[in-house]
Image: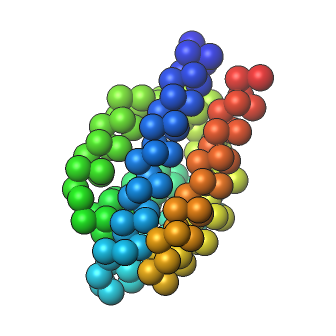
């Protein structure tokens, strides 16, 4: 079961990479001043939860939701949310644990800074390390 779940997550990450790259670029171009401030605030809130070793998934969803909204196309958020729900993981799964993928969180601040600074090329570049960390975490569990 873990192998099947991990392989499905890797396929999901491939789709996420294509969509999220476009989303963060659009957010860096299209976000209002208020949206940029909210993305930054939500990033700070997410990192507080992660570093305190508390349940971070709600804060992560809020952070990414603000980016999807700032992209100017609500379909991104709807599609990515449905993809995540299709692969809902239980807390018994190694992929559903709050310890899973923690290395991916520090780069969220760099991504946020690029969005806030209205730098779409940098934002697109900074989403990849986040997804790379998650990819490696999945592969480490599968090996």
Residue that appears at 59% across and 48% down: 131
User: What sort of colour scheme is used for the picture?
Assistant: rainbow
Residue 63 locus on image (x, y percent): 41, 63
Where residue 106 appears, as percent x and y from the top left, is 65, 64
Q: Is residue 92 visible?
A: no
Image point (44%, 80%), residue name: 118
Which residue is more in the foreground, 18 or 107? 18
Provide residue 54's location: percent of width, then percent of height.
Answer: 56, 56
Looking at the image, the residue that sits furthest to the front is 121
Q: Nearer the viewer, residue 119 or 105?
A: 119
Q: Where, by quadrant of the figure, is residue 104 drawn?
A: bottom right
Which residue sits at x=33%, y=60%? Answer: 68
Give residue 123's position: percent from left, percent from top.
Answer: 52, 68
User: Toward the viewer: 139 or 100?
Assistant: 139
In the picture, the quarter occupied by the C terminus is: top right
* Left or right side of 108 for 102: right
Which quadrant of the figure contains the N terminus?
top right
Q: Residue furthest top?
A: 1
Splitting the image into 4 quarters, where does residue 29 fall?
A: bottom left
Residue drawn 41% across and 48% down?
19
Among all residues in the image, which is located at the extreme bottom? Answer: 33
Left or right: where 6 falls relative to 38: right
Is residue 60 among what the camera can see? yes
Relative height, residue 93 to residue 36 (above, below) = above
Above or below, comparing residue 133 to residue 120 in the picture: above
Asked if 143 appears above or below 120 in the picture, the reply is above
Image-based side of 134 in relation to 26, left or right: right
Instruction: Please count the marks in the image.
Output: 0
Say above or below: 80 vs 38: above
């Amino acid at each position: 079961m873990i192998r099947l779940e991990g392989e499905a997550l890797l396929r999901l990450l491939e789709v996420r990479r294509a969509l999220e790259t476009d989303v963060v670029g659009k957010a860096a171009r299209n976000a209002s001043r208020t949206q940029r401030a909210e993305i930054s605030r939500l990033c700070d809130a997410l990192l507080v939860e992660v570093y305190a070793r508390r349940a971070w998934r709600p804060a992560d969803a809020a952070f990414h939701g603000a980016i999807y909204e700032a992209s100017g196309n609500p379909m991104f958020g709807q599609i990515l949310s449905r993809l995540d729900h299709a692969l809902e993981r239980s807390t018994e799964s190694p992929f559903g644990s709050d310890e899973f993928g923690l290395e991916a969180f520090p780069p969220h601040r760099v991504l946020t800074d690029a969005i806030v600074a209205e730098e779409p090329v940098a934002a697109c570049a900074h989403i990849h390390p986040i997804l790379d960390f998650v990819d490696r975490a999945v592969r480490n569990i599968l090996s």
